[in-house]
Amino acid sequence: LMSNHALVTQPHLYCYLQGRGIEDAIQWARLGWDNGWLVIPVRDGERVIGVVWRAYPSVASATGMRYDVPWGQSPLMYIPDQELWNGQETLYIVFGVLDAISMALAGFAVASPTLGKGSFDPKWLDGEDKSVVVVPDRNEEHAAFELAARLDYRGRTLLLDYPDGTKDVNDLLVKGGIDEVKRLVLVGGID
């Protein structure tokens, strides 16, 4: 495993993160690189409890895989910035680790399941008495409504008005920057 330092010092590795708009998260999200995969550690405080690998484009096209986790790793809740999570009154749930990093860059307390939209366990939030807003990708609205309903009184869904050429929060970050992510989340989505 290469350190996250390599992502900054090796231009070909850094360019991918820059293209995804998440280069500013390298240090605080402790992103790493391993043989063509972006390594995203899942932490419980300072302790690493799991990992998600995101394939760089060349690996994705060669393998047909975009994400992977270690064999036998159960679904986990990925929180990119624990300080934001602990300090805000509203929590957001997205369905992808890069979307979670994108939301955290915009200053939102956010989490994502590590094994896709159907793997979020509402029990992960049993200790939270905060409002929980599920922000789906385009065409994942049904899964968002189901999850929000399973969160009882805390849960609601926010459908973003994704501009043409975007389908998720990371696309918003890439196309419009942090200010566009903030604007669309804070205006309350679409009816």
Image (cartoon, grey):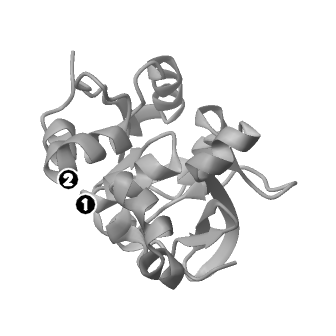
Q: Do the residues labelled 2 and 1 touch (CB within 8 Å)?
A: yes
Frontmost residue, 91 versus 36: 36
* Residue corresponding to mark 2: 178
Frontmost residue, 78 versus 14: 14
Instruction: Report the amino acid beneath label 2.
Output: Ile
Seen at 37% across and 28% down, the residue is 167
Give above or below for 61 relative to 22: above
Give above or below for 6 relative to 158: below
Q: Which percent across, then down, holds residue 41?
A: 60, 69
Which quarter of the figure has residue 191?
A: top left
Q: In this view, does 119 lie to the left or right of 184?
A: right
Seen at 45% across and 18% down, the residue is 139
Residues packed near mark 1 inside 10 Å, few (<14), some (14 to 19) or many (20 plus)? some
Q: Which percent across, then down, holds residue 135?
A: 37, 35
Instruction: Report the amino acid beneath label 1.
Output: Gly
Q: Which percent across, then down, holds residue 61?
A: 66, 39
Give above or below for 136 relative to 32: above
Residue 109 appears in view? no
* Residue corresponding to mark 1: 107
Q: Which percent across, then down, holds residue 166?
A: 32, 29
Residues packed near mark 2 inside 10 Å, few (<14), some (14 to 19) or many (20 plus)? many
Q: Looking at the image, is mark 2 or mark 1 nearer the viewer?
A: 2
Q: Which numbered disc flags the more N-terminal residue, 2 or 1? A: 1
